[in-house]
Structure formats: structure tokens, C-alpha cells
Image (spheres, rainbow, N blue to C red):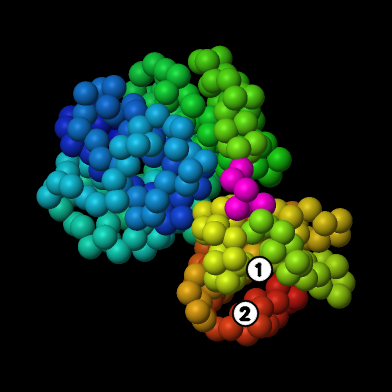
Amino acid sequence: MLNRIVEEIERNRTFLITTHENPDGDAIGSSLALANFLKKLGKEVTVHLCDQVPDVYAFLPLAETIRHDIPYSCYDVCFVLDVGEFRRAGTLFNSFRDVGLYINVDHHLNCENTDALNYVDYEACATGALVYRIIKAAGHDIDLDIANCIYTAVITDTGSFRYSNANPEAFAIAGEMVGKGVNAWDLSEKLYESQPRERLELLSLALATLSISPRGDFASLSVSLDMYEKTGATAELTDGFVNYPRSIRGVEVAVFFREIKPGFFKVGFRSKGKVDVSALATAFGGGGHHNAAGCNVSGTLEEVKRQVFSHLEKAL
């Protein structure tokens, strides 16, 4: 499959790259790593996102070129990265069909395969690792711009190498990227030590919603629309909130309820390993990985909690 993808890159000229809504470090990092690689080959490249680029990733090379429209009528190839399900790429992208070939690159367990090329490896630490493999298979040198993007994808999707997907390849890729000039401290400072004040103000309100199950085996936080209004924060600043309840001793699964609009919640799950939260998310029409997954659920916060907690109690 790698050789086939390299062949398509070599023989085509125009490329569209897209990823999922509410993009995380892997989504942004892998997209921009691929974009930098293709541009250095002299290709015409458009990176499309349905949502804004989180400020924390704005420092990555070519982040300023990301589009929220699709400026051309057709492309030779479209790379769809890290989406899991195509609907997560947004309505604009899903209504756009004038592409010669789709290439789906992903590492989600419940990845939706396309009728085109599917490069999916469930054991990969990040989609950024798969983009790394594509670049290496092409025999192209990885410069500092590409290295910063790949390192960001790997470090964020492995939780700074704390999660179970921090496999030997993750460390090998990270080490190679440092060898290419990545400044691990500088990049980590940009990712984790440059928080806006509004994020901490929102976190203080979210922590006040902490709920722990009677047995102490699962815990949750929630963020409401009112909290955004009080703090001036945005949804992107909630990234990582779910890790606070997961860090409690004895908690096996953490849940984060984020209100998207009245009566509609994004639910994020994080597991310490004993529970497959992708199965939980799938029960609600979502998906993800064994230890990290998500879904959307309608209802009031209390109704959504009751539904989710009922399934979670059975899983535990």
C-alpha cells in the first residue's frame, strides 16, 4: 500500500488534505507534515478544515495556509487523515466529490474504509506515524518543518508518551525528529506551557462539576455553554480536561461532557486500560480507540449522564 500511495503522489499534481472536526494535535500535525512534504515536491496543496485551527498549533509550518473553504473545483488526490468516520470531516467536505482518488490514512479501531485506497494501521501510535512512513517510503528527506509537525502529532496523541499507544515506533520517530533539529523543550513549551488565562478560568468551573461514582471507578467533568459565556473561553480550550478525572486514584474511566448546543452534548471517554471505551462510544453512534473515544448524545445534562453512566456501570 505504501508503494501505491507513493506512486499516486509521484504521478499527480493537485492534492486536497482534510481531517476531522475539532482537530487535535495528531490531526493538525499529520495534515501539515503531509502538506509540507507535498509542497517541497512542487505539488499544489490545499489543507481544508471545517473548524478553526486551535491557537496552540498555530506555530506549525503552513498552519497559516489552512483553508475553511475548498477553493478549487477538482483535485487529483484527496488525503483524508485521522477521521475515523467521514462525517467527521464536515458537511462542506462531504458534499465535495470532484476528486480523482481518495486516500484514507488512519489508525482508529473503527475506521470507516473508503472505496479507494485505505492505509489503516490500528497499532500505529498516531496518524502522524503513518504520514512519516509515507514520506520515508518516498525516499524524501525529513526537514525541520516536517519534523516539527510529525513530532507534534506523536507527542500529543501519545499523551507525551504516557498512553498505551506509546509503542517503540513512537519513541523511535520522536528520537529521529529530535535528530532532525526538533527542540523538544521549545515545542513542549508551545504545546503545554502557553495556556491562555481563559482556559484556566474555564477549568476552575469545570472542576467544580467533578462527579465520582459510588465505587470510585469512574468520574466525570462537564462544561456548559454558560461557562463559555462567563469566561470568554472557546470549546478548543477544553482539550485535556478529561485527563483530570482520569488521574484520580482508583478511577478506571473518565468522562467529559461538553455542551455543544442546548440539549446536545459531545461526550469524551478516557480509559486506563481495563475498559474498551470505543465500545461504549460505538453504542451511542461514536467511535475511537480502546483507551480514548467519543460520541454525541442528545438530552439534558442529567439525562445524558444517566444514559452514559448506565452503560458505563455495565462495562465496569
Determine whether label 2 and label 1 are within 8 Å by CB: yes
Front residue of 24 and 273: 24
Q: CA distance from mark 2 to mark 1?
A: 9 Å
Q: Is residue 291 visible?
A: no
Residue 165 has which mark?
Answer: none
Amino acid type at circle 1 is: Ser
Which corner quadrant of the image does residue 28 belong to?
Answer: top left
Question: Is 153 displayed left or right of 249 in the figure?
Answer: left
Q: Residue 198 colored magenta?
A: yes
Q: Secondary structure at mark 2?
A: helix
User: What is the quadrant of the C terminus in the image?
Assistant: bottom right
Residue in the image at 55% along x and 57% along y: 233
Question: Is 254 displayed left or right of 34 in the figure?
Answer: right
Residue in the image at 39% along x and 16% along y: 141
Q: Secondary structure at mark 1?
A: strand
Looking at the magenta stretch, what is its main secondary structure?
A: helix
Q: Residues within 10 Å of mark 1 (few under 14, many from 20)?
A: many
Percent of width and height locating residue 155? 59, 35
Front residue of 212 and 97: 212
Q: Residue 297 colored magenta?
A: no
Which corner quadrant of the image does residue 209 belong to?
Answer: bottom right
Tell me which segment is drawn in magenta: 195-200
Question: Is 53 displayed left or right of 158 in the figure?
Answer: left
As drawn, 299 above or below 291 = below
Give the residue pinned by disc 1.
222
Residue 301 has which mark?
Answer: 2
Q: Is residue 62 visible?
A: yes
Which label's residue is closer to the chain start, 2 or 1? 1
Amino acid type at circle 2 is: Leu
Residue in the image at 30% along x and 64% along y: 91
